[in-house]
Amino acid sequence: MNVVIIGAPCTGKTTLCKMLENYGFEHVSIDQFRKKDWESFKPEDEKEIYEEFFKYVIPRDNLVIDTPGISPFFQERKHMIRDALFIKLECSLEECLRRLERRKDQINVTPSLLRWLYLSAEKLPAHVVINTEELTPAQVLRKALEAIRRHEKRIEDKYLDELLD
């Protein structure tokens, strides 16, 4: 089973993914496949990034995938991620901007880029939505683990039904 964590920057995706590593998941971020910083990034680079990303992700299990989820290249192939549970993290734009101010590792994400990504991520579909605004990372983790357990149970039931048919 794979878990895909989507949402705007500063909603807690990377924090949650790192915590889920302690539960046997391999953390894979779309940023690992981006070879350029945002300033030199061109739209045509995006297709290449997602080609490499899906080449890595498709044959694997037990991944926790960290991506905003808004790219059309991601949207058109996301169904290929095996037994994927999509968890969307969200919070208010104001909270995302406050979190961005506190982060030193996001110097390439400007407030205007964050606003654009935030608006683009608002309507993304997911199996589960967790609002991280007033939750601690541990509380977000607890909600995510509950969703993962429910999803695993559904997958087990589906395979059992197929075996019995």
Image (cartoon, rainbow, N blue to C red):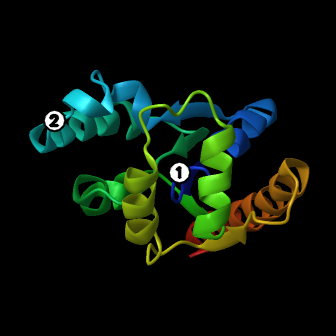
In this orientation, which residue lies closer to the viewer: 65 or 9?
A: 9
Side of 83 relative to 78 (left or right) = right
Q: State the mark number for residue 45.
A: 2
- Badge 1 amino acid: Pro
Rendered position, 162 above or below 32: below
Q: Quadrant of the C terminus?
A: bottom right
Note whether residue 12 is visible: no
Q: CA distance from mark 2 to mark 1?
A: 20 Å
Q: Secondary structure at mark 1?
A: loop
Q: Which amino acid lies under the numbered mark 2 shown in the image of this protein? A: Asp
The vertical placement of 28 against 71, above or below, is above
Q: Specify few, some or many for label 2: CA neighbours under 10 Å numbering under 14, 14-19, or 20 or more.
A: few
The numbered dot on residue 147 is none
Residue drawn at point x = 33 percent, y = 35 percent: 53
Q: Which of the two marks, 2 or 1, is nearer to us in this view? A: 1
Question: Which one is nearer the viewer's eye here, 9 or 49?
Answer: 9
x and y percent of residue 57 in the render? Answer: 41, 37
Q: Is residue 78 above or below residue 42?
A: below
**Helix or strand or loop: what does disc 2 sit on?**
helix
Residue drawn at x 22%, y 37% is 51
- Residue at image coords 31%, 39%: 54
Q: Give residue 73's position: percent from left, percent from top.
A: 23, 53
Q: Which mark is residue 9?
A: 1
Q: Quadrant of residue 77?
A: bottom left
Locate residue 158, reporting x and y percent: 61, 70
- Rate crowding at label 1 as few (under 14), some (14 to 19) or many (20 or more) other CA atoms within 10 Å: many
